[in-house]
Image: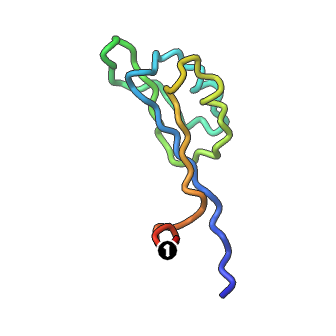
Amino acid sequence: MNKEKIPPRYFPEIDPEQCKGCGKCVYSCPKKILKAGDNINSYGFRYVVCVEDSCVGCGNCFYSCPEPGAIIIYSDDGEDEGEKSRK
């Protein structure tokens, strides 16, 4: 069976408590999927949220963020759930 591999999908995750709302990630995102959220973290900052699922995994948000650990980009490696469970 010759099954084509599905391209990987990427998911940025922003830690609300680490985000200081500087907006550097928002401006650096080529797909414009990040925006300043409406909620405030325990430090009084409006933290950034991801509003779409079209992340390309470029890492611009991660590298532009001055807070280590505030943004992590996850990938599904192009596998569906069935493939993951068979490995």
Query: Would residue 10 be found to the left or right of residue 38 on screen?
Result: right
What is the residue that sits farthest to the bottom in this orientation? 1
Picture residue at 56% right of the left edge, 65% below the top: 79
The residue indicated by pointer 1 is: 86
Give percent across and percent down for residue 19: 45, 21
For the N terminus, the image quarter is bottom right
Q: Quadrant of residue 2?
A: bottom right
Give percent across and percent down for residue 31: 63, 39
Picture residue at 66% right of the left edge, 31% below the top: 60
Give percent across and percent down for residue 16: 39, 26
Front position in the image: 19 or 85: 85
Count all numbered tags in the image, as a single digit: 1
Q: What is the secondary structure assignment of the residue under circle 1? A: helix
Picture residue at 60% right of the left edge, 58% below the top: 77
When the figure is inspected, residue 22 is found, relative to residue 29, above or below; the finding is above
Front position in the image: 18 or 46: 18
> Which amino acid does the dot numbered 1 rest on?
Arg
